[in-house]
Amino acid sequence: MKTKGLRTNKINIVTLGCSKNLVDSEVLFTQLKGNGYNVTHESKKDDANIVVINTCGFIDNAKEESVNTILRYVDAKEAGVVDKVYVTGCLSHRYKDELEVEIPTVDAWFGTNELPRLLKTLKADYKHELVGERLLTTPAHFAYLKIAEGCDRPCSFCAIPLMRGNHVSRPIDELVTEARSLARRGTKELILIAQDLTYYGLDLYKKRNLSELMARLSDVEGIDWIRLQYAYPSGFPLDVLDVMQERPNICKYLDMPLQTGSTELLKIMRRGITREKTEALLETIRAKVPDITLRTTLIVGHPGETDAMFEETYDFVERMQFDRLGVFTYSHEENTHSFTLPDNIPADVKQERADALMDLQQGISYELNQKKVGRIYKTLFDRKEGGYFIGRTEADSPEVDNEVLVPATQYVRVGDFAQVRITEAHEFDLYGEVVA
């Protein structure tokens, strides 16, 4: 198949991995649209002749998914269905040299900070006037707002700094401008993301400045919810809680990955905190914001994790009663500090530990959800699926948390808020009826 003239080409962007990758894809999407190109995101039709794959390189499963996706489109290229395959993102940044050898039919590889070079390869100009403008791939009523790139933390297990570089904050004025632009186009919920929100501002303003950013974003007209994800516990700026309590449009919600409940393992992980200090921080957070929803993420099977350490973590989860919890099994990542340690915990033991924690959390979630029956919650509706409108409360982030299901016999508009009385609660789903 001959390559078509560039102006008649169709470009499909495929995104793998986290919400930070999704934002990068949206920026690329916006730049290409600004250059007049026909662009889609994760087209179901497979009718694009140029494919850009934005990869994830976080852990083994994510890397495998990225490689399989690349191979799928390389096969499509060899079959004449696709003309060009370009790969960007974390996996490409980290393993570019090896991948070029192993998959030579990919047309070009790009790192996480090479958007201008990618655009040049696609014969598009980088348009500075589009900085702060973003076409969304999410439903218009919510958007991820990436406030910083990279990470300066020394966590032993994490390869993110290898792929994303050091922490770089975006200026407050730039973020406020982007938030206003999103609000004008119907965005009602901003989800603040970074590798570590709490580091925000140290490089630009010589202080932790997340609280000021939150206040400024809170003043943007049309933004009803602002949600915080990925806050690091060590050095957590407590003034964030004051702003959260004072501003009604800042969700009383905090995603704080804690990784383990064992002080000894926290030291091996180089997390800069103990279980005792973590528990004291959680008590302070709950005292300052009594109705806050706390989400955390844990790792099981890290090198050096004994049965006794895992039992500490299990006990920690049981006592802390997190509203939301996710578990990863440890992935042995090259060039990290943990890679120098033997990965000698069998995969089945890792999975048993993960399953035990999730079984525990399932019971905790069920008990917490039962307390919501009969109460009324402001709910933002994301979609209609089957016989239900599906939404989220202030306590729920998209894709990872509980959902509220309202029978479609009652009408609600997707993208709007409604007051919902909870009538039934399961482990991870709530059912309700619109009351206003």
Image (spheres, grey):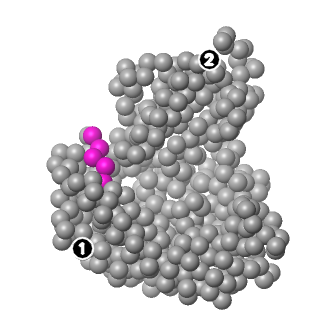
> Mark 1 is on which residue type?
Glu
Give whichever of 99, 410 is nearer the camera.
410
Q: Residue at x 68, y 68 (%)?
A: 391
Dot 2 falls on a residue whose secondary structure is: loop
Give whichever of 362, 261 is nearer the camera.
362
Please tell me in which quadrant of the rendered image residue 371 appears. Answer: bottom right
Q: Does residue 331 show up magenta in the picture?
A: yes
Q: Sequence-wise, which precedes: disc 1 or disc 2?
A: 2
Residue at the disc numbered 1: 311
Question: What is the magenta segment's predominant secondary structure?
Answer: loop
Q: Does residue 255 show up magenta in the picture?
A: no
On the image, the x and y values in percent for residue 409 come to 82, 73
Q: Is residue 321 left or right of residue 187?
A: left
On the image, the x and y values in percent for residue 174 come to 61, 49
Q: Which residues are magenta?
A: 330-334
Question: Considering the image in quadrants, where does the N terminus appear?
Answer: top right
For the residues marked 1 and 2, what is the alpha-carbon distance in whole angstroms?
55 Å
Q: Residue at x 36, y 44 (%)?
A: 60
Residue at the disc numbered 2: 80
> Mark 2 is on which residue type?
Gly
Residue at the far top in the pictured view: 2
